[in-house]
Every structure is written in structure tokens, then in C-alpha cells.
């Protein structure tokens, strides 16, 4: 165990090694590691952000979906209402039309009946006149009694 | 074992293995241990050079296997320093801790080289005394501890100012009353002396003892068949245990470095 100049030489070597490490070895390693740490932290933050925005988008999509459903239901109910309205209208119209047709037919029938009555009346009056002529022969003046017969025919 | 032929006694064997390859006048201050210096500088250049080559190509993207390994080391040291030192650790203390840990670790790890096989390889190169483990030379551990000691004083003065540092020397830990100043100073003196001593001698003692035990087991293995068997088994056991010691001592040396430098930044 003898202390000698080796000590000083070793100390110088030690100092140079430390200087070398401080200057050339440590900084690039530190830089690389810190940069990677930052990149990883950024990546994690971005992932978090993405997750959050995904959640927001999901919420939005479910909201708009339910809105659309509501709208569709409204439209369907409106359409149903409209359809029943149209149906009702059509029914009413048909009924009116039918009524009108029936009314027209009735009027025609009445007319027809009246016409038949008229012609029957005329025929009856002429028949009555012919009958009376046959019965009375010349006793009756056609002219004198025609007024009376016409009056009679009108009363029928 | 190869040395048995040339070296006659066990004490000579151990002495041979524990003598340095020296340069300069024997037993003077200007002696230099060539083996310690060459081994430590080569190891430092190789390891820090390898780490540097990885660091130069360091990418923030997917790291290569080498970069992943270096980052493992980086994070391990950075975490340790972060827990102890609460300033800007990246400016000096953390890289210094990395240097200390890596360098001391590889210097300690030279203890795994089997002493006699290495000795025969060295003698093939014409070198007859060569110690492979720089940290079992007290000059190395003292050099590191003293460098840390000077850094400690440097940071103490830089953070607190010369006046503040001197003030603390006399007023901490017992208080500012004038009659406790001598006690404070004595206390701090002991602290300043004991820090580099315990710092360096702990590492030196562990590595030196490890080496000596390998040598003793080598000696036992040379005594015969039973010695060979037990020497080999115990040698293997000691090697395995030594893995722990090598890493642990490097870690302790680094932690103490960080603790001392962090303490220098704190004012009482």
C-alpha cells in the first residue's frame, strides 16, 4: 500500500472520463429519452382526446337518431290522420253523390208517373167520350159537351 | 500454478501476484504503476467509448438492443441520483455518477480474470509482474475518492460562496454560539478526513481481499488432488459470490459519490 504518482495520473484520467461523459455521453442519451417520454405522453394525451371526442360523437349520434325517430313517428301519425281524413271525405262525397243520384232518379220517376197519369187521363177521357158516344149516339152534341168532358178529365 | 516452478514458496507466489509493474525510482513518490494506469485507462476508454458510440446514434424512436441496454443503465443511475440530489442533476452529478459506476464496475470485474492464467498470458508477452485489477491498487481508489472530495469542496464553495462555506465549517452542526466553534470545526475536519478515507478504503479493501482469497485458493489447489478439488470448488463459489461484491462495491462507490456531492449542495 504505497501512495505515489499513480494517484495523480488516475485522478487526471478520472477527470477526463467525467468530462467526456458530461459532454458527450449523457446529453444525447438524455435528449433521446426525454424526447421519447414526451412523444409517449403526447400520444397518450391524443388517445385520451380521441376517446373523449368519440364519446361526444356517440352521444350526438344517439341524440340525432332519437330525434329522427321522433320526427318519423310524427310524420307517420300525421299521414295516418290525413289518410283517414281523405277516406272520410271520400265517403262523404260518395254518400252525397249517391243521395243526389237517388234524388234525381226519384224526380224522374215522379215525372214519369205524372206523364203516365196525364196520358192515362187523356186516354180515359177520350175512352169515356167514346163510351158515352156509343151509349148516347147522336143525342149528345160533341161541341156542347166537350168542355164538360175536358173539365172531367182534368179532375181525374 | 504455472508459477510453482519458478517461485519456490507460497509467500513468494502471493508477493509476486501482488506486486505492481512499476516505473521510476522504487519507493519514491514519483513511482508509477504502469499496470494500474494502463488497465484503468483502457477499460475506461473501451466502456465509455462503447456507451458513447451508442449515445451518438441514440434515437427517440424504437431503440436498438444496445441503446435499450444503455438506457437501462441510464435510467438506473438517473433514478438513484434523482432520489438523492434535488438540483439540476443532468448538468454534472448524474453523468459523473455514470462514469464512476461504469468505470469502477469494469475495473472491479477484472477480478474475474483467473490470476494464474492471466499471469501466464502476460509472461508470454514478456511481462512478469502485472496486476489486472486497478481498484485493488489503493492509488486508484484514492484518486477517485480525492477527486470526489475536491468536487465536494468545489460545489460547497460554489453553492454557498466562500464565506458561507467557511461559516458552515464553524457553525454546523452544533450551532452559531462562539464557544462551540472549535467543536464544530473539529467535527467537520473529522468528516472531511473520514469521507475520502472510508470512500476509497472500502472499495480497495474489498477488491484487495477478493484478490488475496483467489490467490490463497490457488495456493491450496497446488497442494495435491484434494487441494485441487476443494480449491476449484471454493474458487468457483468465491467467484460467484464475487459477482455480487464487484457490482455492489461499484454501486456503493457511486452512491457515496452522489451522496457526498449532494450534501455539498445542501446548506445547514
Image (spheres, coloured by chain):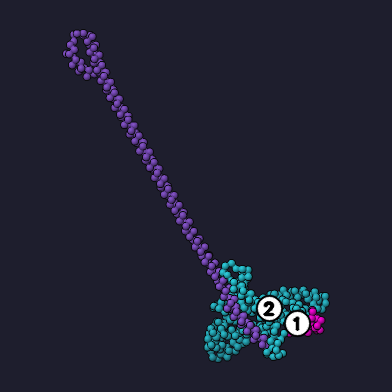
Residue B227: horizontal and vertical position, in percent? 81, 76
**Residue B108: image tag:** 2
For marks 2 and 1, give the one nearer the viewer.
Answer: 1
Report the residue that reaches farthest toward the right.
B224
Label 1, residues with CA under 10 Å away: few <14, some 14-19, many ≥20: few
Helix, strand, or loop for circle 2? Answer: helix
Q: Is residue B98 visible?
A: yes
Q: Residue at x 68, y 80 (%)?
A: B39
Q: Residue at x 51, y 65 (%)?
A: A45
The residue where tag 1 is placed is B126
- Establish whether labels 2 and 1 are both on one chain: yes
Q: Colour of chain A?
A: purple
Chain shown cyan: that is B
Whole-number angstrom distance, CA of label 2 to CA of label 1: 25 Å
* Region rendered in magenta: B1-19
Q: Residue at x 33, y 34 (%)?
A: A96
A29 or A145: nearer the viewer: A29
Judge left or right: residue B164 versus residue B209: left
Q: Are marks 2 and 1 in contact (CB under 8 Å)?
A: no
Q: Is residue A87 above or below residue A74?
A: above
Amino acid at each position: 500500500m504505497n501512495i505515489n504518482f499513480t494517484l495523480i495520473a488516475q485522478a487526471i484520467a478520472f477527470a477526463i472520463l467525467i468530462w467526456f461523459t458530461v459532454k458527450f455521453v449523457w446529453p444525447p442519451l438524455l435528449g433521446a429519452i426525454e424526447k421519447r417520454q414526451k412523444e409517449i405522453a403526447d400520444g397518450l394525451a391524443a388517445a385520451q382526446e380521441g376517446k373523449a371526442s368519440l364519446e361526444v360523437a356517440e352521444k350526438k349520434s344517439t341524440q340525432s337518431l332519437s330525434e329522427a325517430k321522433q320526427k318519423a313517428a310524427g310524420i307517420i301519425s300525421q299521414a295516418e290522420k290525413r289518410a283517414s281524413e281523405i277516406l272520410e271525405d271520400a265517403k262523404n262525397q260518395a254518400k252525397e253523390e249517391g243521395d243526389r243520384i237517388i234524388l234525381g232518379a226519384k224526380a224522374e220517376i215522379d215525372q214519369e208517373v205524372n206523364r203516365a197519369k196525364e196520358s192515362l187521363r187523356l186516354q180515359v177521357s177520350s175512352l169515356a167520350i167514346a163510351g158515352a158516344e156509343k151509349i148516347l149516339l147522336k143525342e149528345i152534341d160533341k161541341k156542347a159537351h166537350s168542355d164538360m168532358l175536358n173539365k172531367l178529365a182534368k179532375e181525374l | 500454478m504455472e508459477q510453482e516452478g519458478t517461485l519456490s514458496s507460497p509467500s513468494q507466489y502471493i508477493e509476486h501476484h501482488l506486486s505492481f509493474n512499476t516505473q521510476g525510482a522504487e519507493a519514491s513518490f514519483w513511482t508509477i504503476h504502469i499496470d494500474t494506469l494502463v488497465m484503468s485507462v483502457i477499460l475506461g476508454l473501451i466502456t465509455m467509448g462503447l456507451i458513447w458510440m451508442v449515445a451518438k446514434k441514440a434515437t427517440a424512436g424504437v431503440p436498438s438492443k444496445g441503446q435499450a441496454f444503455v438506457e437501462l443503465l441510464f435510467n438506473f443511475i438517473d433514478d438513484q441520483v434523482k432520489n438523492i440530489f434535488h438540483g439540476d442533476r443532468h448538468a454534472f452529478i448524474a453523468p459523473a455518477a455514470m462514469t464512476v459506476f461504469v468505470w469502477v464496475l469494469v475495473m472491479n470485474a477484472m477480478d474475474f480474470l483467473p490470476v494464474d492464467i492471466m499471469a501466464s498470458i502476460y509472461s508470454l508477452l514478456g511481462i512478469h509482474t502485472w496486476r489486472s485489477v486497478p481498484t485493488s491498487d489503493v492509488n486508484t481508489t484514492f484518486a477517485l475518492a480525492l477527486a470526489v472530495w475536491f468536487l465536494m469542496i468545489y460545489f460547497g464553495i460554489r453553492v454557498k460562496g466562500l464565506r458561507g462555506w467557511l461559516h458552515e465549517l464553524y457553525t454546523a452542526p452544533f450551532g452559531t454560539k462562539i464557544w462551540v466553534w472549535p467543536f464544530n470545526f473539529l467535527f467537520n475536519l473529522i468528516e472531511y478526513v473520514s469521507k475520502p478515507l472510508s470512500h476509497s478504503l472500502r472499495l480497495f479493501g474489498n477488491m484487495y481481499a477478493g484478490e488475496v482469497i483467489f490467490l490463497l485458493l490457488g495456493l491450496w489447489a497446488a497442494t495435491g488432488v484434494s487441494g485441487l478439488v476443494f480449491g476449484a470448488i471454493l474458487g468457483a463459489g468465491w467467484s460467484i459470490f464475487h459477482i455480487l461484491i464487484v457490482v455492489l462495491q461499484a454501486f456503493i462507490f457511486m452512491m457515496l459519490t452522489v451522496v457526498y456531492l449532494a450534501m455539498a449542495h445542501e446548506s445547514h
